[in-house]
Amino acid sequence: MHTPALRKAHAISGTLGGCLTLGLASPLLAEETGFIEGATANLQLRNYYFSRDFSDIVGPNKQSKAEEWAQGFILDARSGYTQGSIGVGVDVLGLYGVKLDSSPSRARSGLLPTHDDGRSADEYSRLGAAVKFKASSTELKIGELRPNLPVLVHSDLRLLPPTYQGASLVSKEWTGLTINAGQLHSTSLRDSTNTQDMYALINDPINPARIARFTSDRFNYLGADYSFNSNRTSVGLWQAQLEDIYQQRYYSFKHAEPVGDWTLGVSLGYFDASDDGQSIAGKLDNHALSNLLSAKHGGHTFYLGYQQIGGDDGFIQIGANTNPLGNTLPTYEFAAPDERSWQVRHDYDFAALGIPGLTTTLRYVTGDNVSTGQGFEGKDWERDLDIGYVVQSGSLRGVGIRIRNVTARSNYRSDIDENRLILSYNISLF
């Protein structure tokens, strides 16, 4: 007898094959440039300083500071496709990180792997490849993947990005409609050289890692996004499953409306999650509403966001990633049980003042009504300032610098003061 989890996995696998068959049946050529002619390779150099100070520490980890400095190298090489109705190609990803400064008392920043003795590794590396097939407007990849989906966000927030191993399919056979389907069986975390089964994190004020010990080797997803109204409006429907742990549905609506010199936008998302299959991590129940309004004029973009968490649990997601909720920040998530949060944000592109390459982002999020399980209402707030600049000309053209300063305060979790300094440079090899 098939369990509901297995039936969902089979359904997703069937969709993968069905979408690819549609592409293969098309008489259109997959690629006209060729395997070699369409190849590209880029090397990104990333120098990363990370400092996070904790105060009023809550939880078993009493480390008061995480501070490390490291150098990363990210090689992204992609072939073109062989010519013909079915194009074949290969993508290669090489990752290498080097420790520049660390100590056991300041380790575990997420930049570097940590040994059993508490010391960070001097260096670490990973190499992965994916074979890809293209027919008409349908592409199938098998191997090392970096999916960026509403149900699995690509969290490239430290020295090196995390990756996943499995199969993904993207089909754009119909105008305005994009279908995504896939099955992942393992992951390599941002600060690891190994592959491992996947686990889930739950936003729990008492024990955020309470279900992390339960792992699965099957993450299945199926999603469709449809854009219309000259691509100013889109709707989305997604289903995801970390087999025998949780299943999650996602519904989205986005719209942008020009009004004179302004562009007004709305991004509305709703998540609904519950336990799956054998429920090895226990009963799970979460739903989350996220709404982000925007108004763009010249170099200014203003945002106003509201987020509401419901159900018995906080937001559930694959670890160790961020999530796509509009009020989630890299430090605090504002996704605890029953939490309500509001966001104000301002982005500015200084190209409007004749300084291309310079951008700023200022965000403030405040949350309340958190069910802490400790007899009091949880509250938190965070202020982020990001300043970025990419040199536009001269011998340093393409060199980027990004500075982040964060202040985050809470009455039920550790307070955080954070600074990041990231230098980057992209080299086009061919």
Image (cartoon, helix red, strand yellow):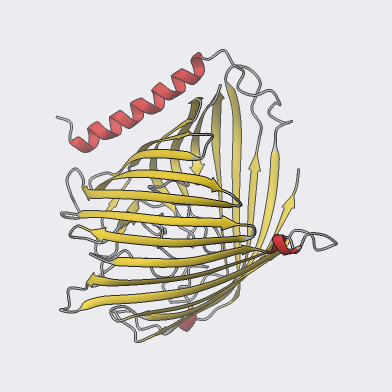
Q: Where does residue 56 sit, x and y in percent of width and height? A: 34, 87
Q: Residue at x 53, y 15 (%)?
A: 26
Count all numbered tags in the image, as a single digit. Answer: 0
Q: Is residue 357 visible?
A: no
Q: Is residue 283 left or right of residue 170?
A: left
Residue at position x 42%, y 59% in the image: 322
Residue 263: % across, % down: 55, 50
Q: Farthest residue toward the bottom?
A: 56
Q: Quadrant of residue 68?
A: bottom right
* In this rendering, position of residue 417 left or right of residue 101: left
Relative side of 47 to 59, left or right: right
> In the displayed image of the protein, which residue is found farthest to the right?
394
Frontmost residue, 354 versus 288? 354
Give x and y (percent) for residue 134. Answer: 56, 26
Q: Residue at x 29, y 55 (%)?
A: 288
Q: Is residue 218 above or below residue 141?
A: below
Answer with the quarter of the image where residue 403 lies: bottom right
Q: Nearer the viewer, residue 189 or 341?
A: 341
Is residue 421 visible to the viewer in this orientation of the structure? yes
In this rendering, the answer to whether 386 lies above or below 139 is below
- Say which of 296 and 238 sits in front: 296
Q: Quadrant of the C terminus?
A: top right
Q: Nearer the viewer, residue 120 or 253?
A: 253
Where is residue 361 shown, x and y percent of the image? Answer: 56, 67
- Side (left or right) of 174 relative to 337: right
Above or below, comparing residue 86 to residue 241 in the picture = above
Q: Residue at x 70, y 60 (%)?
A: 352
Q: Quadrant of residue 423?
A: bottom right
